[in-house]
Amino acid sequence: MAPETPPRDADAKPVKSDRWAMRMRTDAMQALRYTRFVTLMRRALPTAAIAILGVVVAYAMFPGKSERVALSYQKMNGVVGDLAMQKPRLSGVDAKGNPYVITADVAVQQGRNSRKVALNKVDADLQYDGGNWANASAGKGFVDLDAGWLRLTDGISLYTDGGYELHTKSAYADLKKNMIEGKERVNGHGPLGSIAADSFHIDRNTRRLTLHGRVRMTMLPKKVKR
């Protein structure tokens, strides 16, 4: 009769093969998290850029879906259970051939397998209408792709090569309804004059910008084409 195999001590250290298997499983799970986070950032960065641009124009200048995009980053690391991406950079070309580049200093996923991302110092550069360019930036952003909203804070600015610029402190975007609103002062100026208001609302479906409260507009007659 063959001797019985002695029971394994619960406190005994795992053999080398067990440790290797555990490490492989851990590495695989971490790699899967990284892959999901990269996929998430390919959605979060354009979403932030669209809302930044929408804050200051009555129609969406930013391109729609593009198949030619590239996402790079400096490094990936963990922050108390969350994933953080340093210096993410998304570049691509829209359906009309207009190139764009979107960057951020840091992007942090909020919780495991979450589709919520906190962004720091978002910046977007793009070309449109045959070579014109625009730059938009925001100090901070928070995207919830499941709920379909984005909040931008710490200052939002847009500049164009036509000499226009607009500034406001914060904005909220309902990504499902294509609505963007800001409840803080917005100021802008350009070759044709200047505008200012206490708040604004943008409907990207109708391409309509509505200004509210202490609205002031100054036009320069010599610059306006008749």
Image (tube, rainbow, N blue to C red):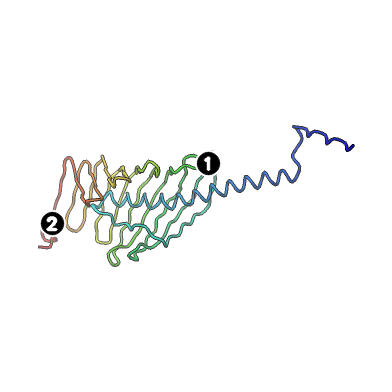
Residue 43: numbered disc? none
Kind of residue sitting beneath label 2: Leu
Q: Nearer the viewer, residue 167 or 57?
A: 57
Direction bottom: furthest residue:
130
Q: Nearer the viewer, residue 49 or 193?
A: 49
How dense is the environment of label 2, judged by Cα within 10 Å: few (below 14), some, or many (20 and up)? Answer: few
Dot 1: element: strand
* Horizontal and vertical percent position of residue 164: 24, 56
Q: Residue at x 53, y 49 (%)?
A: 34
Kind of residue sitting beneath label 1: Val
* Horizontal and vertical percent position of residue 173: 31, 44
| Left or right: where 223 falls relative to 62 | left
Tag 2 residue: 220
Tag 1 residue: 79
Dot 2: element: loop
- 194 shown above or below 170: below
- 192 shown above or below 169: below
* Horizontal and vertical percent position of residue 212: 18, 42
Q: Quadrant of the C terminus?
A: bottom left
